[in-house]
Image (cartoon, rainbow, N blue to C red):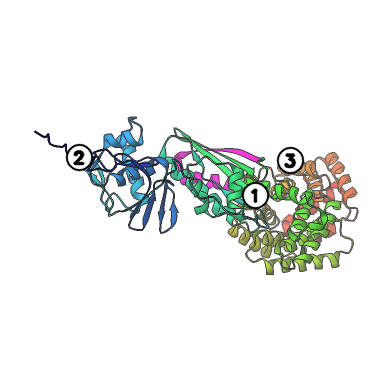
Amino acid sequence: MRRPMPRPVRRPRVCRIIGRTTIARSDTESGAPDQRTATVQFAFEDYLLDQLRRELTWRGQVVTVGPQVFDLLLLLVSNRERVVSKDELLSAVWSGRIVSESTITSHINAVRKVIGDTGEQQRLVRTVPRKGYRFVGEITLSDSPVNAPEAPAIPEVATTLVLPEKPSITVLPFQNLSGDPAQDYFADGIVEDIITALSRLRWLFVIARNSSFTYKGRAVDARGVGLELGVRYVLEGSVRKSGNKIRITGQLIDACSGTHLWAERFEGLLDDIFELQDQVAESVVGAIAPQLERAEIERAKRKPTDSLDAYDYYLRGTAKLHIGTREAIEQALALFYRAIELDPEFASAYGMAAWCHFWRKLNGWMTDRPREIAEGARLARMGVELGRDDAVALTRCGHALAHLTGDVDCGIALLDRARLLNPNLAPAWYLGGILRALGGETESAIANLEHAVRLSPLDPEMFRMQVGMALAHFFAGCFECSVSWAEKAQGNLPSLLVAAALIAASHALSGRTDKAGQAMERVRRLDPTLRVSSLSAWLPIQRPEDVARFAEGLRLAGLPE
């Protein structure tokens, strides 16, 4: 008697999917499963969940998803025919570790958030009381078998992208080192804020957020990223949370050479997490912008003279301007004029050239004052006209115009617009602070200058921030503070005339006649033509009482009438 053949064994279609999927198919002839590795994509509503790429997209746009939130969504979608218990969640997503009920709930809420669902609606992810969770959306599944055991996470780029003419950067997703996926949104938010802030720098080419975030969760090499995205610089970082404290680190890398250009650590409390997120993004951008500029200046210096373009001349001029000496400013001015000659619509070059004329006026270096003042004002107005949306141009042009024409209110308005365009541009803050000090707004001036120092604590033009603080404290009547700040500025740039004058006047008004006399000797050496009667023509001080105070201090220190 023949024995009945056994029934084919029905195996579950998918048990757990992490990374790649093994699809078990029933074979009615042999009962043996034919297991094939497949690339699985789950389509629901306007979303596409790509298992192999570990990527969720909405209408083609990449959605930021933390690793554990992605695993949780993938588990629910893969087992959509049934309720997934909390024990299964712990086993699949947390490797069996015991986590709190609130942690599970927060992750389920995070899943709902990334797919446009809520705990109230439960349109896609439904809570089954005392049982678990189930994905209830309609899904279209596509699976494409592949023979190779591994597949690249992203397709190879057939051709290397050419670097843009201006500096270029990508900000990679920061690593979450906290072991708490709930912090993913914080790390991602910082990166998005940094990208947005850097995008306001017109001289910088910034890779869009959606391209940068394709590297999320992947171990990448900065050089490889630079080649794939066609950028010179890569900013990467990490976030670590401990109790109520959070630490963010960042590093800037030259993707062409692999050289680390800058690294910094930022710490804060989680009392107001969104405020901290803004502060960190602001600090990072304020710190790396000067580093990028320095790196580009060094690159321009290494280029042969016969291959320089307008931007290269601009960078070389900027390097000279940072030095601040008479010789350096003369060289900078010639370089900015050459940049304008090559690119007549280069707004920032006009602004820098105008600013060189202002600096010559401030330090008594002009040989033909009426002609040079008129030329500086012409350049500044041209820069404003060409660069209405260029924060750098508005900053330098606005400050130069205030000094060259005496219209401090106009200068402040232009710098305020520059700060609106780029809130992280340190020169807009410290030059705006100086103008506010000249306008008698000493408290606002000090606040602006302090913020500039916070944005760019290693700025090559730190002496300008220091002399601005000296001015503000002098007009506020705090002569001791004025001397302290002016001496710091003078230490950084000994040829700075206004610093020497503030030291002399502050000592004189404080009754220290010997020190006042010594400081005045330096003033007379720096500019033998300076007189008390020419004070208003030298500096656009707006309040009569401030003019009178400065004049009295200089007079007591020994400056001729």
Mark 3 vs mark 2: which is more N-terminal?
2
To which quarter of the image does residue 387 belong? bottom right
What residue would you read off at disc 1? 232
Query: Which quarter of the picture shows residue 490?
Result: top right
The residue under the point 90% across, 48% down is 525
Spatial distance from mark 2 to mark 1, Cα to Cα?
59 Å
**Residue closest to the eye, 488 or 204:** 204
Q: Residue furthest front?
A: 1
Q: Position of residue 271 (x, y in %)?
A: 45, 40
Amino acid type of the residue that numbered disc 3 sits on in the rendered structure: Ser
User: What amino acid type should be assigned to the residue bearing mark 1?
Assistant: Arg
Relative to 425, is 530 on the left or the right? right
Where residue 479 appears, as percent x and y from the top left, is 73, 44
In this rendering, the label closer to the viewer, 2 or 1: 2
Q: Disc 1 vs disc 3: which is toward the camera? A: 1
Q: Which quarter of the image is occupied by the C terminus?
A: bottom right
Q: In this orientation, which residue lies closer to the viewer: 293 or 405?
A: 293
Pair 3/2: label in front: 2
Vertical placement of 346 versus 294: above or below?
Answer: below
**Label 3 residue SS:** helix
**Circle 2 is placed at which residue position?**
8
Q: Which residues make up the magenta segment?
A: 261-284
Upstream in sequence: badge 2 or badge 1: 2
How many residues crowd around disc 3 within 10 Å: few (fewer than 14), some, or many (20 or more)? some
x and y, in percent, of residue 559 in the image: 87, 51
From the image, tell me which residue sits under label 3: 484
